[in-house]
């Protein structure tokens, strides 16, 4: 029986990044979804605008990983609700062909990045993060020569970043995560420090969905918290 005798529900959700899948797989494999009375079908959506359109027309009940646009939608009076954000900062690194002492030395440099908006009209979150790092360094955005090599954050973009620096098509780029291959290629790595930022497996739904499904918000948050708790408590089992 489901915890708290929840009414069984079947819902559909979008995830915005493949890095979210491990946690959702933990929920499935450990029976957390089942205990909460939820049967969920996930699909990938690479555009925040397209994901939100599906959310508002009821095609999906929630989105995993829409970070920035919900704030603007709330300000416009749209019935969107942000339920949880398990990660609240990013720690990017500046990779460059020549050694840099700070991001302020990007003035006049070519910085490889995504476009500001994706093909669906949604904002590219990582581009916004990188713009904030540039401004925190005391530069205007126009002080940097933005080399736009992709319209979405993806593994293809990560590969394109590396190749752009190797081929000399850009002077620098900003990276989230491991930088080993850059270091092995003789490129220079500068930690940029913590940037407070909504991030990771955020959960977004609508007022209509919360009314339609029995305690949907409570169950989604419990599912996420339970999955994170399991992964941290049983790391070996989780990696399997």
Image: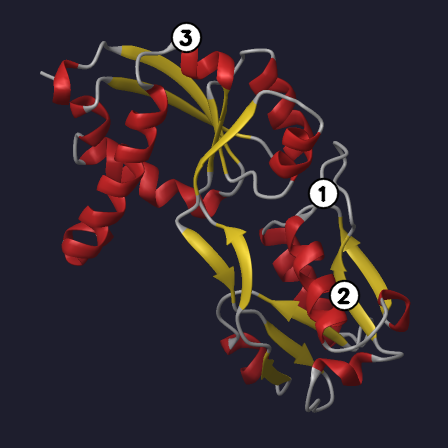
Q: What element carries label 1?
A: loop
Q: What element carries label 3?
A: helix
Q: Are marks 3 and 2 in contact (CB under 8 Å)?
A: no
The residue drawn where x is 43% and y is 54% is: 87
Look at mark 2 in the image and give the residue it sits on.
112
Q: Position of residue 126 (x, y in %)?
A: 65, 55
Q: Position of residue 232 (x, y in %)?
A: 21, 56
The residue drawn where x is 77% and y is 34% is: 121
Q: Mark 2 or 1, which is nearer the eye?
A: 1
Q: Give 7 or 106, whichever is nearer the viewer.
A: 7
**Residue extending farthest left:** 1
Q: Residue 78 vs residue 1: left or right?
A: right
In the rendered image, the vertical position of residue 221 relative to residue 105, given as above or below: above
Q: Which mark is residue 123?
A: 1
Q: Which quadrant of the figure has residue 188? A: bottom right
Q: Is mark 2 on a helix, strand or loop?
A: strand
Q: Residue 138 vs residue 229: left or right?
A: right
Q: What whole-number distance in Å separates the C-alpha atoms at marks 3 and 2?
A: 44 Å
Q: What whole-number distance in Å separates the C-alpha atoms at marks 2 and 1?
A: 17 Å
Q: Earlier in the sequence, mark 3 or mark 1?
A: 1
Q: Give 212 or 40, whichever is nearer the viewer.
A: 212
Q: Position of residue 192 (x, y in %)?
A: 59, 77
The N terminus lies in which quarter of the figure? top left
Q: Position of residue 26 (x, y in %)?
A: 25, 40
In the rendered image, the vertical position of residue 194 relative to residue 211, given as above or below: below
Q: Earlier in the sequence, mark 2 or mark 1?
A: 2
- Residue 2 visible in the displayed image: no
Q: Give 240 or 200, whichever is nearer the viewer.
A: 200
The residue drawn where x is 46% and y is 14% is: 209
Q: What whole-number distance in Å separates the C-alpha atoms at marks 3 and 1?
A: 29 Å
Q: How crowded is mark 2: few (under 14 residues within 10 Å), some or many (20 or more)?
A: many
Look at mark 3 in the image and give the residue it sits on.
212
């Amino acid at each position: 029986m489901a915890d708290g005798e929840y009414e069984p529900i079947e819902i559909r959700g979008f995830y915005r990044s493949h890095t979210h899948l491990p946690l959702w797989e933990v929920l499935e494999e450990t029976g957390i979804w089942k205990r909460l009375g939820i049967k969920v079908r996930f699909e990938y959506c690479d555009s925040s605008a397209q994901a939100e359109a599906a959310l508002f027309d009821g095609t999906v009940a929630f989105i995993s990983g829409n970070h920035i646009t919900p704030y603007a939608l709330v300000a416009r009076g749209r019935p969107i609700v942000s339920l949880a954000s398990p990660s609240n900062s990013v720690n990017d690194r500046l990779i460059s062909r020549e050694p840099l002492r700070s991001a302020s030395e990007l003035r006049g440099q070519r910085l490889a990045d995504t476009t500001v908006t994706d093909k669906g009209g949604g904002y590219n979150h990582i581009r916004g993060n990188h713009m904030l790092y540039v401004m925190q360094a005391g530069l205007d955005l126009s002080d940097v020569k933005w080399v736009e090599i992709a319209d979405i954050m993806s593994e293809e973009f990560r590969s394109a970043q590396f190749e752009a620096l190797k081929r000399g098509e850009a002077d620098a780029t900003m990276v989230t995560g491991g930088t080993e291959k850059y270091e092995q290629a003789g490129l220079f790595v500068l930690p940029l420090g913590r940037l407070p930022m909504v991030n990771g497996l955020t959960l977004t739904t609508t007022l209509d969905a919360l009314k339609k499904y029995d305690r949907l918000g409570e169950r989604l948050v419990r599912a996420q918290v339970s999955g994170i708790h399991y992964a941290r408590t049983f790391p070996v089992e989780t990696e399997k």
